[in-house]
């Protein structure tokens, strides 16, 4: 990350979602650059909950003195709120809980679409040097079973008449806003379509499938699947993903999307569950199926998506960790949080 430190030297970086998982890791990386290379990076963090943010970044801690917190929702943020120039933006904030997507679809859609438009407007007014928007593999929707590796231009179907679609459709519209802000105003924004990211930095109370599997190993309990687990999972280790985002910020083409995925980690949920039971838990636990009649858990429909990382790899990025490594990191990290 040393050459990155040169790029960010004496700049101001705005990070949304800084109390969340990936936003938090980006902030940590930028703070580490300040400590290691004395880069003089200033951080601007718009946050909904300033108490939560101060817990994560205590003002009394000398290493966080470069942080300015702004209490605002992204639906309400205005370009003049950071009363300073902004050079770079990582827009990471978004809901990730399926249950919230089902129960509060309007608020989820507004947060994604209006929030992203407001951040793009801020980027335009501040004339930033580069911005990365964190989108999701869910933007692809349902792709065909036999289309092979999916590149950035191969979008599938999303059901408009499903509350859960507020997320993938919101992400698509946010991406479109990125593109039209680039086309009309020249905003230098790039889009990162993230696979499922985990490993170091995941909250021990995370409710997503990978976290449930890791907790099963920790607690010596069988892995319980509420679906047949036929969905294809695309994964990337958290530090690899952060490096990818920095790479896209520096080297990506404006107005373009990049898949962030480790292709070697792509497998069906049921196969991942077996891998965790056999290789990570060394056979101490097994996989059990308990499938309810209705979709009470708000799971997305089965997907056969297998993302291609070729476009990102052409920028010089390479993933370093496979799924077994990711689970070992995740379990270690969950254990030290207690």
Image (cartoon, rainbow, N blue to C red):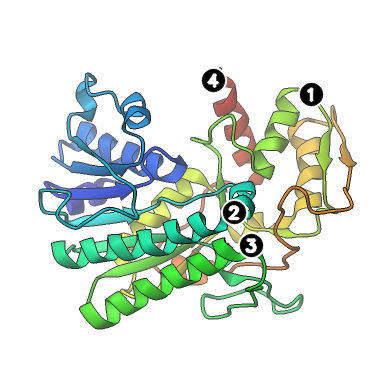
Which part of the image, by quadrant, shows the C terminus? top right
Nearest to the eye among marks 1 and 2: give it.
2
* Gap in angstroms between the C-alphas marked 2 and 4: 30 Å
Where is residue 155? Give x, y as percent. Answer: 58, 78
Where is residue 249? Give x, y as percent. Answer: 31, 61
Disc number for residue 163: 3
Pick whichever of labels 4 and 1 is earlier in the sequence: 1
Disc number for residue 336: 4
User: Does the residue at mark 3 contact the one at mark 1 (Cβ under 8 Å)?
Assistant: no
When asked about the image quadrant of residue 264, the answer is: bottom right
* Residue indicated by mark 1: 220
Nearest to the eye among marks 3 and 1: give it.
3
Q: Residue at x 63, y 58 (%)?
A: 234
Pick whichever of labels 2 and 4 is earlier in the sequence: 2
Q: Residues within 10 Å of mark 3 (few under 14, many from 20)?
A: some
Q: Residue at x 73, y 78 (%)?
A: 144
* Gap in angstroms between the C-alphas marked 3 and 2: 7 Å
Front-most of residues 1 and 254? 254
When asked about the image quadrant of residue 254, the answer is: bottom left
* Residue indicated by mark 2: 101
């Amino acid at each position: 990350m040393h050459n990155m430190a040169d790029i960010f030297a004496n700049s101001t970086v705005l990070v949304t979602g800084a109390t969340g998982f990936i936003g938090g890791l980006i902030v940590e990386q930028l703070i580490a650059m300040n400590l290691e290379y004395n880069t003089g990076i200033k951080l601007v963090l718009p946050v909904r909950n300033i108490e939560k943010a101060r817990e994560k970044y205590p003002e009394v801690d000398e290493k966080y003195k470069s942080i300015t917190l702004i209490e605002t929702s992204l639906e309400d943020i205005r370009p003049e709120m950071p009363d300073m120039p902004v050079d770079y933006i990582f827009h990471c904030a978004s809901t990730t809980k399926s249950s919230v997507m089902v129960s509060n679809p309007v608020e989820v859609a507004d947060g994604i679409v209006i929030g992203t438009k407001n951040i793009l407007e801020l980027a335009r007014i501040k004339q930033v040097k580069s911005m990365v928007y964190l989108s999701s593999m869910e933007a692809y929707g349902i792709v065909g079973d036999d289309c092979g590796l999916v590149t950035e231009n191969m979008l599938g179907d999303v059901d408009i008449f499903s509350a859960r679609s507020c997320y993938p459709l919101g992400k698509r519209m946010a991406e479109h806003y990125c593109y039209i802000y680039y086309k009309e105003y020249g905003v230098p924004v790039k889009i990162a379509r993230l696979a499922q990211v985990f490993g170091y930095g995941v909250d021990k109370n995370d409710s997503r499938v990978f976290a449930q599997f890791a907790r099963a190993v920790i607690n010596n309990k069988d892995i319980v699947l509420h679906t047949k687990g036929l969905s294809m999972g695309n994964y990337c280790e958290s530090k690899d993903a952060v490096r990818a985002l920095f790479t896209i910020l520096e080297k990506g083409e404006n107005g373009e999307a990049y898949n962030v995925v480790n292709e070697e980690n792509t497998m069906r949920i049921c196969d991942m569950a077996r891998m965790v039971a056999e290789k990570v838990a060394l056979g101490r636990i097994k996989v059990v199926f308990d499938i309810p009649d209705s979709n009470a858990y708000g799971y997305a429909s089965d997907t056969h998506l297998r993302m291609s990382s070729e476009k990102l790899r052409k920028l010089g990025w390479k993933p370093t960790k496979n799924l077994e490594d990711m689970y070992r990191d995740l379990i270690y990290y969950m254990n030290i949080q207690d």
